[in-house]
Amino acid sequence: MPVVQLEEVTRHYQMGDQRVAALGGVSFEVGEGELVAIVGTSGSGKTTLLNILGCLDRPSGGTYRLRDADVRGLSDDQRSRLRNREIGFIFQSFHLLPRATAVDNVALPLVYRGLSRRERRERARQVLERVELGHRLDHRPNQLSGGQRQRVAIARALVGKPSLLLCDEPTGNLDSATGEEILALFFRLHEEGATVILVTHEASIAARCPRVIRMSDGRVLSDGPPGGQA
């Protein structure tokens, strides 16, 4: 069963008396263990699509299934629970709690899983070691470099063992050398079996992914290997 299935997904917004189409019938599937880049310029619809994939928004029409759940038919609370259980988010601006240590930032999603504080911290420690930050457990974000903060954010996304990692311009706030380290980490996670969707406006990053979905004006322009058309 695919991790992600979209069939003719649309999203419309009402702006005054005008109806604006942000997505105009998007269809694709993402299988277990795939690494997919979604690329497009500003206004292409990729941010709206990311919000739907991440269960932060629901489609106006069509079907979005995450695992076996029809997301469009879920209540807000059901979508929140699905998001916590199945999705790991990695953002451009990290979104870390400034007064919390690295290990407490990473453990945060597990609060809603019913685990004890000791279990949460132990799982957070294990994942921080996986992203090579086992020596920074008790450091706060202002004591970490940009690359280290992004590694904490990646560990936080991984700690709940999600079905899907959603990455929104994850190297956008990093210098080129640090960005390269973070990309290498994503490729390693993919090799270990993670399902990753990486949203970017940078064609050079998309070109290094096995599969690229190119978007324009709320529609899929092409879907296939880098440089190819589908």
Image (spheres, grey):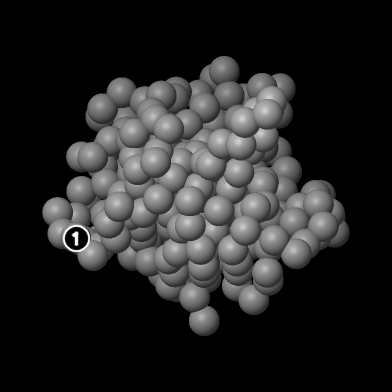
The image quarter containing residue 72 is bottom right
Residue most extreme to the front: 17
Residue marked by disc 1: 229
Residue 197 showing in the rendered view: yes
Residue at 68% over, 71% down:
69
In the rendered image, residue 173, in percent from the top left (x then y), is placed at 41, 24
The C terminus, quarter of image: bottom left
Between residues 180 and 16, which one lies in front from this camera angle? 16
Q: Check the image and report above or below for 126 versus 68.
A: above
Asked which secondary structure carries label 1, the reply is loop
Instruction: Give the residue type that dot 1 points to.
Output: Gln
In the rendered image, residue 150, in percent from the top left (x then y), is placed at 48, 34
Between residues 215 and 154, which one lies in front from this camera angle? 215
In the rendered image, residue 226, in percent from the top left (x then y), is placed at 19, 55
Between residues 39 and 10, which one lies in front from this camera angle? 10
Residue 101 showing in the rendered view: no
The image quarter containing residue 102 is top right
In the rendered image, residue 222, in percent from the top left (x then y), is placed at 27, 56
Mark 1 residue crowding within 10 angstroms, few (<14) / some (14–19) / many (20+): few
Residue at 62% over, 31% down:
18
Q: Check the image and report above or below for 1 versus 71.
A: below
Residue at 49% over, 75% down:
2
Q: How many marks?
A: 1
